[in-house]
C-alpha cells in the first residue's frame, strides 16, 4: 500500500481517466441521443431508417473487404479476382460499412475529437457480421499507435473499438500485445507503395504476450481499411510471431479510387 502523501503513478491516473471516459461514453450511449446521420433522437446512435439506408447488407470479398461483383456470391465465390490472384496475408477482412456519409464524420469525431459516444453506432454493422464468432477461440488485438501519437490524441481509437468488440463477443483482448516501435507519421496522401515502405519494421509483438499470440487465431481491429498497408505490416508481424491465423476487422472500408 502506498504511504500517505504518495502521489498516484502516471499509469494509474491514465487507467482511471480511461475508465471514467469509458463509463461516461457508455452512459451517454445508453441514455440515447441524436442519430449520427439524420440527427433525430434515438437510442444507440443510429435510428432504424438510417441504419437500413446507410448500413445495407451486401456481399463483400473476404480478401479485401470490397463489395463482390454481382453473381460471384451466387456461385459460392467469396473472393474477387484480384484477391484470388494475389492473396493477402490475412485469412479474411470483415468490414461493417463502406466509408462515406455518415460514417466518415462519426469516425473523425471518434478518432480526433475524443467523442466516444458514437462507438455503439459505429460498431453495430460490424457486430452484425460477427455474431457467429461470439465465444469463439479468437484473440483480439488493436492496431497500435506510436507513443507520440498516443500522447497527442490521449487514447487509441482502435483499442477503444477492439475492447468493445471483445466485450460484446465474449472474446479475449489485450491492449498491448502489438506495439508500434516507431512513429510512422501520417499516412494520408501517401500511395500504397509509399505507405508500405513507411511501415516496414513498425510493429513488434511484445515479449510478455508472445505466448498468447503464438498458435492463436488473431482478430486485428482498426477503424478504417484504406490501402491495407497498415494491416499488411501488422499481419506480417503477427504471423512472424507464430499466429496461426489473422483476420482483419474494421468499422469501414474505403471504396476503390
Image (cartoon, rainbow, N blue to C red):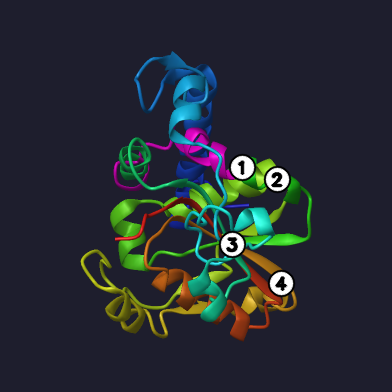
User: Can residue 87 be seen from the camera position used here?
Assistant: no
Foreground: disc 4 or disc 1: 1
Foreground: disc 3 or disc 4: 3
Q: Badge 1: few (under 14), some or many (20 or more) residues near its Cα, within 10 Å?
A: many
Residue 58 part of the magenta-drawn span: no
- In which quadrant of the rendered image does the C terminus lie? bottom left
Label drawn at residue 212:
4
Quick one: label 1 or label 3, which is nearer the N terminus? 3
Give the SS element for disc 4.
Answer: helix
Quick one: label 3 or label 4, which is nearer the N terminus? 3
Label 2 near label 1: C-beta < 8 Å?
yes
Q: Position of residue 160 (x, y in %)?
A: 50, 48
- Give the labeled residue for mark 2: 169
Give the SS element for disc 2.
Answer: helix
Label 3 near label 1: C-beta < 8 Å?
no
Give the SS element for disc 1.
Answer: helix
- Give the labeled residue for mark 3: 62
Q: Badge 4: few (under 14), some or many (20 or more) residues near its Cα, within 10 Å?
A: some
Figure quadrant of residue 149: bottom left
User: Can residue 252 be seen from the camera position used here?
Assistant: yes
Label 4 near label 2: C-beta < 8 Å?
no
Mark 4 to mark 1: distance in Å? 24 Å
Residue 218 vs 99, above or below: the answer is below
Foreground: disc 1 or disc 2: 1
Over which residues does the magenta segment extend? 110-126
Mark 1 to mark 2: distance in Å? 8 Å
Residue sitting at x 53%, y 32%: 23
Give the SS element for disc 3.
Answer: loop
Mark 2 to mark 3: distance in Å? 20 Å
Amino acid at each position: 500500500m502506498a504511504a500517505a502523501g504518495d502521489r498516484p503513478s502516471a499509469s494509474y491516473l491514465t487507467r482511471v481517466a480511461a475508465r471514467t471516459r469509458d463509463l461516461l461514453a457508455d452512459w451517454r450511449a445508453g441514455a440515447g441521443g441524436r442519430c449520427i446521420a439524420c440527427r433525430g433522437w434515438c437510442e444507440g446512435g443510429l435510428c432504424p431508417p438510417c441504419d437500413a439506408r446507410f448500413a445495407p447488407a451486401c456481399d463483400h470479398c473476404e480478401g479485401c473487404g470490397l463489395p463482390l461483383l454481382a453473381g460471384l456470391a451466387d456461385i459460392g465465390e467469396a473472393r474477387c479476382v484480384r484477391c484470388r490472384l494475389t492473396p493477402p496475408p490475412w485469412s479474411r477482412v470483415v468490414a461493417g460499412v463502406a466509408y462515406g456519409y455518415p460514417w466518415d464524420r462519426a469516425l473523425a469525431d471518434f478518432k480526433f475529437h475524443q467523442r466516444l459516444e458514437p462507438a455503439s453506432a459505429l460498431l453495430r454493422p460490424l457486430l452484425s457480421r460477427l455474431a457467429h464468432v461470439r465465444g469463439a477461440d479468437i484473440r483480439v488485438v488493436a492496431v497500435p499507435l506510436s507513443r507520440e501519437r498516443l500522447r497527442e490524441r490521449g487514447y487509441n481509437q482502435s483499442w477503444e473499438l477492439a475492447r468493445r468488440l471483445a466485450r460484446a463477443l465474449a472474446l479475449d483482448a489485450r491492449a498491448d500485445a502489438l506495439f508500434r516501435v516507431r512513429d510512422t507519421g501520417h499516412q494520408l496522401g501517401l500511395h500504397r507503395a509509399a505507405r508500405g515502405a513507411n511501415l516496414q519494421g513498425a510493429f513488434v509483438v511484445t515479449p510478455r504476450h508472445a505466448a498468447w499470440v503464438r498458435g492463436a487465431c488473431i482478430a486485428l481491429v482498426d477503424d478504417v481499411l484504406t490501402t491495407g498497408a497498415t494491416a499488411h505490416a501488422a499481419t506480417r508481424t503477427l504471423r512472424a510471431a507464430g499466429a496461426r491465423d489473422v483476420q482483419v476487422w474494421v468499422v469501414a472500408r474505403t471504396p476503390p479510387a
